Image (spheres, rainbow, N blue to C red):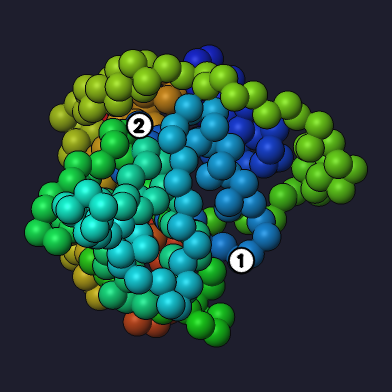
Amino acid sequence: MKQKLASEFTSVVDAIEQHLVGKREAITLMLAAYFAGGHVLLEDIPGVGKTTLAKSFARVMGLDFGRIQFTSDLLPSDIVGVSYFSQKEGDFFLRKGAIFSQFLLADEINRAMPKTQSALLEAMEEHHVTIDGASYVLPEPFFVIGTQNPHEEVGTFPLPHSQLDRFLCSFGIGYPDKAAERRVLLGLEITAQQSDTPLISPERIENLMQQAREVVMRDAMLDYLQDVIALTRESGWFDYGLSTRGALALSAMLKSWAMLHGRDYATPDDLQAVAPAVCSHRLRFSEGVTTAERIHAILFSNTRSDA
């Protein structure tokens, strides 16, 4: 299901891939989520390049970068900031937290206590935070990359479903293939120059986000999308199917994917490309085959995949 990227985005992916060799699919998924206006959860073992991907992405896109290292003793105020009284000025002032960034890396998010994790909920959904009863608007565009280690590791706290649902998509990076890892072992990836010049202007980013929203879904394609959504709810394979917010996320992501590949209309290939990343963290089941296998079965079942 290889699709050719539009030339404008090929240069962006190439620039990021200089620092994360052989991971074009993960980079493209992150771009699609960004232009769809969503957030990304990277789930993988330590050391495969989650933080490298986040930093390179922010630099190439020219985004103001903030990072929070989540630990068990992290407090909500460490994320959003705190209002303090200045005796010298005789008034209250806001000391902003790292969340006041266009691009926030929430590193190892599942090492923080649930109360601290929940400090991100309002920001991710509404793009503002409340501190001591006052509301503060976050910079736009606001984009969160959360990383988390496998749940079985000691000292991790599973993200609640309400938190997971705030992430538009979730995927792993995985090990590099043999050729890519050879380049890493030879040190070839560190020869790439880290340019401080963004490849896309803020005005262009806003324009591309609007283009993604305007991608057309013809009736047959919309029928196929609704069939897939219905099967997650009615097949009996999952404890619960996609919510309305999950359905909207799937629609936004496939439109953005189509835009990245130079089209102003969506196709079944777009849905099949993004559905695993959008659905895997939203669907739950008790026993049996993996979520990925069931999503694949739904996508290629007797639905209108020829839309």
Q: State how far apart marks 2 and 1 are (Cα).
A: 26 Å
215 vs 227, nearest the viewer:
215
* Residue at image point 70% right, 32% down: 18
Residue at figure coordinates x 24%, y 58% from the top left:
87
**In this rendering, would 182 be left or right of 194?**
right
Residue 113 quadrant: bottom left
- Relative depth, front residue between 162 and 179: 162
Residue 185, compared with residue 279, is above or below; it is: above
Q: Quadrant of residue 140?
A: top left
Which one is in front, 58 or 216?
58
247 on left or right of 81: left
- Horizontal relation, residue 264 to residue 44: left or right: left
Which numbered disc covers residue 111? none
| Image location (x, y in percent) of residue 53 | 58, 44
Furthest residue in direction front, as rendered: 88
The residue identified by callout 1 is 45
Toward the left, the furthest residue is: 133
Q: Amino acid at mark 1?
A: Ile
* Residue pictured at 37% horizontal, 27% vertical: 258
Mark number for residue 35? 2
In this view of the protein, which residue sits in the foreground, 50 or 138? Answer: 138
Which three-letter amino acid code belongs to the residue tagged 2? Phe
Residue 7 in view, yes or no? yes
* Quarter occupied by the C terminus: top left
Q: Secondary structure at mark 2?
A: helix
Q: Is residue 101 above or below residue 109?
A: above
